[in-house]
Amino acid sequence: MSEWFGTLPKRWENRRIGSLLQQRKEKNDPVKTDFILSLSAKHGVVPYYERESSGNKSKSDLNTYDVAKQDDLIVNCMNVIIGSSGVTKWDGAISPVYYALFPINSDVNIHYCAYIFRSPLFYRNIRQFAKGILEIRLRISMDSLKAIPLPLPPRTEQDQIVRFLDWKVSQINRLVNAKKKQIGLLQEQKRAVVNEAVTKGGEGWREIRLGNLGTFRKGFGGSRVDDTENGFACIRYGDIY
């Protein structure tokens, strides 16, 4: 197959994942930990109790989980094709659909590999290795994952790349947070202006009951499947109620 990353600098190597990373095959049976980890493309690895409300529910039987160690690269075999991977900061229990990977030797910086796994160029190209009957159930086996090539610079360059990306991502996150704060203040200002206008009004305004402006009646038929972008705008009686 043609390599997804193109031509490499001469000092870099073209290496298969299986020659760089190995899977941690440790079962949580008997139970070694009840600290469950969750993984998503958006947030990476987080404690299960901090996850967003959507997603799979944890199993009550902790014996069915695998074990991950701090600094393992956690990969969701079903969602890796949309970037669902990340390095864990904790030891913990992980779903059997997750792979816990760690370097075979000190030549590999696991955070360098993590940046590759979360790169759209990488995870969109490895989609060809995913198998499954349904689109939403595509899965990459560990054997297939091992065969995928990665660009590997010398360890010193990996470390430099990671330091630069950590700094750049941190810088971008600060800008994003600042913008979110600014947006929040503008929204608060907008609500204050609207509230001022509709509650205090202007000169010559008077108070009137909503019922004096018209009549309310239940609509005749229709459902959400009848919605169109054209025609008269309406609000369903049930939504008001």
Image: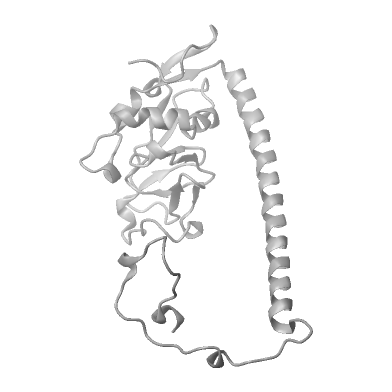
The image position of residue 97, as x and y in percent, is: 32, 44
Task: State the residue in front, 137 or 228.
Answer: 228
Image quarter (top left, top right, bottom left or bottom right) of the N terminus: top left
The residue that appears at 41% across and 39% down in the rendered structure is 82
Residue 105 vertical placement versus 67 (above, below):
above
Can you tell which quarter of the image residue 19 is in?
top left
Q: How many marks?
A: 0
The residue that appears at 58% across and 22% down in the rendered structure is 158
The residue that appears at 68% across and 61% down in the rendered structure is 184
Residue 33 vertical placement versus 218 (above, below):
above
Task: State the residue in front, 159 or 135.
Answer: 135
Can you tell which quarter of the image residue 171 is in?
top right
The image position of residue 80, as x and y in percent, is: 39, 38
Task: State the residue in front, 123 or 189.
Answer: 189
The image position of residue 103, as x and y in percent, is: 46, 27
Task: State the residue in front, 189 or 65.
Answer: 189
Judged left or right of residue 202, residue 133 is left
Image quarter (top left, top right, bottom left or bottom right) of the C terminus: bottom left
The color scheme shown is one colour
State the residue lying farthest toward the left.
133
State the residue lying farthest toward the top.
10
The residue that appears at 45% across and 47% down in the rendered structure is 40
Residue 112 vertical placement versus 46 (above, below):
above
The image position of residue 148, as x and y in percent, is: 36, 23
Judged left or right of residue 188, residue 88 is left
